[in-house]
Image (cartoon, rainbow, N blue to C red):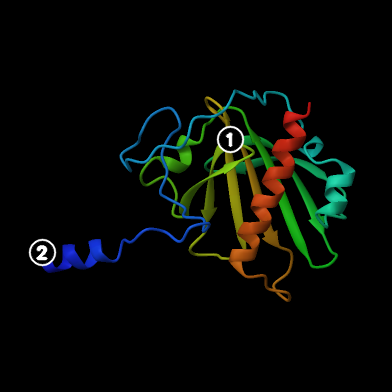
Amino acid sequence: MIAVLLAVVSGCGAPDPGAATPAPVSSSASAEPSGIALPPRPREVRIDGIDPCSLLTAEQRAELGLDGRPVAYTSAHGLFGRAPSCSIRGSDPREVSVGLSVVADRGIEIFTAPGRVTDEVSSLTVAGFPAVLARPTLVRDFCSVDIDVAPGQLLDVQFAQGTRDQPIPQDQLCRDAQRIAEAVLSALLAR
């Protein structure tokens, strides 16, 4: 037992300076059983009544390679309940799809509570706001970033490959999800 513990501890050196080191997360309001809390949010940004299709301007969509028309719908996602959502496709330079959901009745805790999700979840910040990066472990054709914008509210950004004929590595999907999340939050903060 001691040998195993020493082997584990010796493998836990200091992270490479400048390298991102995601950590398991918990609620920004208090530490969950995982023991690691998200940083505090810099301020509250209420999202009640926000149209998710208005969160990216036409210019931002063009810069991000999203040339499809935004399509509004109400998600029936198990974690989010019924949330206003928007889907935007991109075809150039590759087939992709972005899903944006404005979840005004559930907070980031749905990702940080033990046993709630099967995704690999790590913490990050988006424009100074606490967020989680959720990497599905069963289906690897998308990645999502969920931003803690206010108590009991979050923005969900999913980035997915648009077709199985053009697979995109999940690491790239996660980087693109973070890029979209930055643009969405910047547009929201500019209101």
Amino acid bearing label 1: Phe
Q: Residue furthest bottom?
A: 165
Amino acid bearing label 2: Ile
Residue occupying the point 68% across, 57% down: 176
- Is 47 above or below relative to 124? above
- Mark 2 burial class by Cα count in 10 Å: few <14, some 14-19, many 20+: few
Quarter occupied by residue 82? top right
Residue 15 left/right relative to 172: left
**Front-most of residues 58 and 85:** 58
Q: From the image, which quarter does the N terminus lie in? A: bottom left
Residue occupying the point 59% across, 24% down: 43
Q: Which residue is mark 1?
A: 129
- Is 128 above or below relative to 171? above
Q: Residue furthest front?
A: 17
Q: From the image, which quarter does the C terminus lie in? A: top right
Distance from disc 2 to disc 1, alpha carbons, whole Å, reads 40 Å
**From where the camera sits, is residue 1 visible?**
no
**Front-most of residues 109 and 8:** 8
The dot on residue 2 is 2
